[in-house]
Image (tube, rainbow, N blue to C red):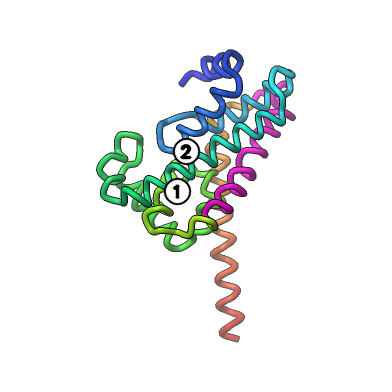
Amino acid sequence: MDTSILFSYVQSYGYVIIFLFLFFGIVGIPAPEESLLFFLGIVIARKQLLWEYCFIVSWGGVVIGMIVAYGIGRFLGAPFIKRYGKYVGMKEEKWERTRKLFHRYGKWVILFGYYVPGVRQISPYMAGVIRFPFRLFLLLASVGAAIWVIPIIVVGMLLGQHVQIPLIYFPMIGIVLFLLFLLGVWVGQQFRKKSLEN
């Protein structure tokens, strides 16, 4: 979607469009979530929307999207998702990549997977399919949503009116941060193995 159109939607429909875009973005229907969150920071800086409502509505849209996707995964199962997921961008290779990540780093994928487009859409379905404990899922999804939504909005608030940052870079930044996080996990595991051997 053209970012100028997205901006006009936010200005025209406010909190409703924020909630819907983030909800649908999480359940798998393509939506420019990072661009939207960054735009929210710009809109908040211009005092066109209230920051507290933007945070609450954004967080709520993400968390409710995660709960709905978890429910679909839990009650309809992997065959349904694999069969129909392609219609909302959940291709087989994305599913397999997320499955491998999830079985190895399940809790961390729920918590930090928001920063990786594709992973954030598939991880709640995967959690439901493998019957990940719902209360723990809800806690991790809620905390993860906050630590994804808030920093991007804040960056928009602080820099949006003063620094021209191409929005295409935000998903890339998220991917880099997530890869650095996985690298940190791997390095930590190597240190633990060495300490156990010694």
Residue appearing at x 52%, y 54% in the figure: 137
Residue appearing at x 42%, y 43% in the figure: 69
Please provide percent x and percent y for residue 178: 55, 50
Left or right for 168, reference 123: right
Residue at mark 1: 124
Please provide percent x and percent y for residue 129: 37, 54
Query: 37 or 67: which is nearer to us?
Result: 67
Which span is picked out in magenta?
A: 137-164
Please provide percent x and percent y for residue 63: 54, 42
Residue at mark 2: 26
Residue 131 quadrant: bottom left
Q: Is there a contact, CB below 8 Å, between mark 1 and mark 2?
A: yes
Examine the residues drawn in magenta and state their main secondary structure. helix
State the quadrant of the C terminus: bottom right
Tell me the kind of residue under disc 2: Ile
Query: 98 or 139: which is nearer to us?
Result: 139
Residue appearing at x 62%, y 49% in the figure: 143
Distance (Cα) linking label 1 and label 2: 9 Å
Please provide percent x and percent y for residue 43: 67, 21
Using the image, determine if residue 130 lies above or below residue 16: below
- Looking at the rendered structure, the secondary structure element under dot 2 is helix
Q: Earlier in the sequence, mark 1 or mark 2?
A: 2
143 in the magenta segment:
yes
Tell me the kind of residue under disc 1: Pro
Alpha-carbon neighbours of circle 1 within 10 Å: few (<14), some, or many (≥20)?
Answer: many
- Looking at the rendered structure, the secondary structure element under dot 1 is helix
